[in-house]
Image: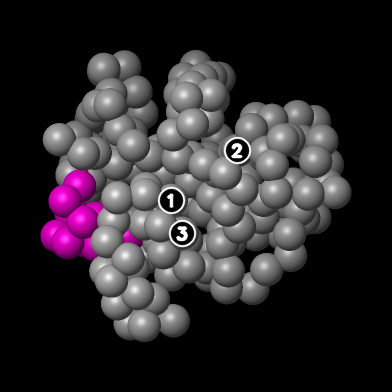
């Protein structure tokens, strides 16, 4: 079973996965699994309630991609234990050449934990991440409006680039038909 793991936290930005998840689940042959810090339902910024499939304490599926969806302050307020678990998980995905995607505060989290120090990337703004102690890659920051930045298996985007973020993830998976990606690009951009 082909799987994509999406980490959601309380007050997650529901629009940031709104295009990607259905394209994967309905048309690309993937199962989308939602992971969180605990089993409690998570409520999005738009009041959508999602019951996580798994917690960080459970064995995660052998996923092709790990996606970190933005959330109001939640990425910045994680316990040290959960921050470390997510950082180690994302680092393992990177080392294995699997996709790591961070959008909005998901990208902030990646920067804050040193996971963007070896690749081109973006975030909501450079000023938001430039002074983070673990971030040392200002020269590879790419200023964008509605485009995601892909460097190898790492894909980052600001909150408004969710359509291109979805397209870049679909493309990076390597087995999503080009005609499906083209249809998505035509509909979403």
Circle 3 packing at 10 Å, graded few (<14), some (14-19), many (20+), is many
Label 3, secondary structure: give it: helix
Q: Main secondary structure of the magenta part?
A: helix
Residue highlighted by disc 1: 172
Residue 22 falls within the magenta-colored stretch: yes
Residue 116: give x, y in percent of width and height.
Answer: 67, 38
Residue 29: give x, y in percent of width and height.
Answer: 16, 51
Image marks 1 and 2: residues in contact by CB distance under 8 Å: no
* Residue 167, quarter of the rendered image: bottom left
Label for residue 168?
3
Label for residue 110?
2
Label 3 or label 2, whichever lies nearer to me, is 3
The residue at 68%/68% (across/down) is: 144
Label for residue 39?
none
The residue at 64%/33% (across/down) is: 115
Is 116 drawn above or below residue 186 in the view shown? above
Which of marks 2 and 1 precedes in the sequence? 2
Label 1 or label 2, whichever lies nearer to me, is 1
Circle 2 packing at 10 Å, graded few (<14), some (14-19), many (20+), is many
Q: Judge by depth and name the residue closer to the eye, 19 or 79.
A: 19
Q: CA distance from mark 3 to mark 2?
A: 17 Å
Q: Judge by depth and name the residue closer to the eye, 150 or 20.
A: 150
Which of marks 2 and 3 precedes in the sequence? 2
Residue 62 falls within the magenta-colored stretch: no
Label 1, secondary structure: give it: helix
Could you tell me which quadrant the N terminus lies in? Answer: top left
* Residue 189, quarter of the rendered image: bottom left
Q: Judge by depth and name the residue closer to the eye, 134 or 164.
A: 164
Highlighted magenta segment, given as a residue range = 20-30
């Amino acid at each position: 079973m082909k799987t994509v793991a999406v980490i959601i936290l309380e007050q997650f930005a529901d629009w940031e996965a709104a295009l990607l998840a259905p394209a994967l689940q309905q048309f690309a042959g993937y199962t989308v699994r939602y992971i969180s810090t605990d089993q409690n339902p998570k409520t999005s910024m738009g009041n959508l309630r999602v019951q996580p499939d798994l917690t960080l304490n459970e064995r995660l599926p052998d996923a092709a991609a790990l996606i970190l969806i933005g959330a109001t302050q939640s990425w910045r307020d994680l316990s040290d234990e959960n921050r470390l678990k997510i950082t180690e998980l994302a680092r393992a995905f990177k080392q294995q050449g699997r996709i790591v995607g961070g959008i909005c505060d998901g990208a902030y989290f990646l920067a804050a934990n040193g996971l963007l120090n070896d690749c081109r990337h973006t975030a909501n703004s450079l000023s938001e991440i430039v002074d983070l102690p673990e971030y040392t890659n200002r020269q590879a920051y790419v200023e964008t409006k509605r485009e995601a930045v892909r460097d190898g298996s790492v894909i980052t985007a600001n909150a408004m680039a969710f359509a291109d973020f979805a397209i870049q993830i679909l493309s990076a998976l390597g087995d999503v038909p080009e005609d499906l990606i083209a249809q998505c690009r035509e509909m979403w951009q």
